[in-house]
C-alpha cells in the first residue's frame, strides 16, 4: 500500500457538498488516514494524475466529470486503485454499472461515518492484498530480487524507451563459478545462503534508483542498466566483484556485459550478454567479458 511520510493510507475524497466533504475529511484524518479533498470531478482528476492514492471516495453526481467518469479515468491511470462511490440517489442500473467498472462499494447518503470507515478499511485491505500478490508474482522467493518473468517485462519496456529516446541501455548477466561444487561441499542450505548474500551484494553495487537486479534462475543473475553505455556497465560489473570480495564471499563470477543494440528482440538482447558470459566461463571464469558488436 502506498503511504506518505507518516505511514498513513492516502485517500482522495471528491465531494461537492462542502459540509459533508469537510466532515468526512476531518473524521478520517482523525482515524489516522491521510485525506486529500477535491470539490468537483475535474479537480479530482487532476489530483489523481499528479498523486499516488490508495483509495478514491467520490460522489456519483459531480460537476464537469461525474463519479463514474472519474472512476474510469482514475482506474486507467492506476488499475489497482480501489473506489468507493457515495450518492443520495443512484438507480439500480447505475449501481450495476459502477460495480462492473470495478468499484469496491456503493454507499448511500445519508450514511454513518463509522460505517463509511469500515467500508474504507475493507477496501484498503483488499488493496494491500492485491499489491502483495503483485509483489510476490514479481519477486524471487529466495533472494528477494525480482524474478525472470518480471525481468522480461521490464526489459521490454526499457528497450522501447531507450529506442524512443535514443538513450543507451546495457545488460549484465552473471553466473557463479563452480557453484555445483560449492553445493556438494557445503550443502544446499549453505548454497542458498550464498545466493542470498550475493543478491545483497548486487543491490549494493547497483546505481541507486537506476539499475535493477533480477535472479534469472539458479545461480544466474541479471542487472538491467538504463541510461548506461558499455563503460558504465563495466564499472558496475567491477563494483559487483569488489562488493563480493569486500563481503568475503567464497565465490568468483563469470560476467557478460552488453550495451544493447537497436533492432534486437528480447531474447536477442539476452543472448548478447549470455554469449559474453559464456566466453568468460571458457576463459576460466572470475572475469568479465563485454560483447563485441560487429560493424
Image (tube, helix red, strand yellow):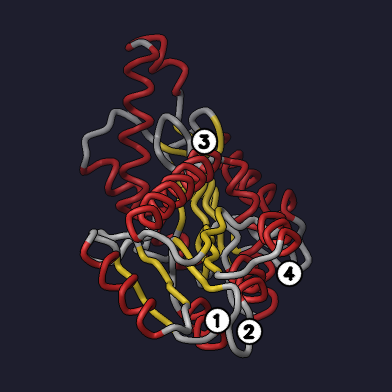
Q: Describe residue 239's horizontal placement relative to residue 175 as left or right.
A: left
Visible residue check, residue 174: no
201 up-or-down from 91: above or below? above
Residue annotated with mark 2 = 65
Frontmost residue, 225 versus 182:
225
Q: How many marks?
A: 4
Q: Position of residue 84 (x, y in %)?
A: 52, 61
**Image quadrant for the N terminus?**
bottom left
* Vertical relation: 140 (above or below) 240: above
User: CA separation, marks 3 and 4?
Assistant: 25 Å
Mark 1 vs mark 2, foreground winner is 2
Q: Are marks 2 and 4 in contact (CB under 8 Å)?
A: no
Which circle, 3 or 1, is nearer the viewer?
1
Of residue 248 and residue 292, the one placed in the foreground of this image is 248
Name the residue tied to disc 1: 45
Sequence-first tag of 2 and 3: 2
Which of labels 2 and 3 is toward the front? 2
Tell me the distance, in whole angstroms, between the alpha carbons under discs 1 and 2: 8 Å
- Front position among marks 1 and 4: 1
Residue 218 in the image: state x and y as whole percent.
52, 28
Residue 63's quadrant in the figure?
Answer: bottom right
Q: CA distance from mark 2 to mark 3?
A: 50 Å
Amino acid at each position: 500500500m502506498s503511504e506518505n511520510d507518516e505511514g498513513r493510507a492516502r485517500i482522495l475524497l471528491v465531494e461537492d457538498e462542502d459540509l459533508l466533504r469537510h466532515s468526512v475529511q476531518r473524521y478520517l484524518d482523525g482515524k489516522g488516514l491521510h485525506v486529500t479533498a477535491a470539490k468537483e470531478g475535474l479537480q479530482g482528476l487532476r489530483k489523481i494524475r499528479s498523486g499516488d492514492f490508495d483509495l478514491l471516495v467520490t460522489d456519483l453526481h459531480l460537476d464537469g466529470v461525474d463519479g463514474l467518469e472519474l472512476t474510469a479515468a482514475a482506474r486507467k491511470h492506476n488499475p489497482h486503485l480501489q473506489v468507493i462511490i457515495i450518492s443520495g440517489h443512484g438507480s439500480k442500473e447505475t449501481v450495476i454499472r459502477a460495480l462492473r467498472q470495478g468499484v469496491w462499494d456503493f454507499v448511500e447518503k445519508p450514511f454513518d461515518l463509522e460505517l463509511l470507515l469500515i467500508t474504507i478499511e475493507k477496501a484498503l485491505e483488499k488493496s494491500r492484498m492485491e499489491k502483495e500478490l503483485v509483489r510476490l508474482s514479481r519477486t524471487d522467493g529466495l533472494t528477494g530480487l525480482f524474478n525472470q518473468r518480471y525481468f522480461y517485462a521490464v526489459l521490454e519496456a526499457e528497450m522501447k524507451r531507450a529506442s524512443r529516446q535514443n538513450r543507451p541501455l546495457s545488460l549484465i548477466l552473471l553466473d557463479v563459478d563452480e557453484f555445483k561444487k560449492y553445493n556438494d561441499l557445503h550443502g544446499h542450505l549453505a548454497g542458498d545462503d550464498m545466493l542470498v548474500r550475493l543478491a545483497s551484494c548486487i543491490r549494493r553495487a547497483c546505481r541507486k534508483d537506476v539499475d535493477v537486479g533480477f535472479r534469472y534462475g539458479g545461480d544466474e543473475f541479471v542487472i538491467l542498466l538504463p541510461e548506461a553505455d558499455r563503460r558504465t556497465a563495466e564499472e558496475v560489473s567491477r563494483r559487483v566483484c569488489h562488493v563480493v570480495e569486500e563481503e568475503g564471499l567464497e565465490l568468483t563470477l563469470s560476467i557478460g556485459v552488453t550495451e544493447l543494440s537497436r533492432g534486437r528482440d528480447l531474447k536477442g538482447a539476452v543472448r548478447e550478454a549470455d554469449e559474453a558470459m559464456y566466453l568468460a566461463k571458457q576463459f576460466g571464469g572470475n572475469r568479465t567479458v563485454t560483447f563485441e558488436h560487429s560493424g
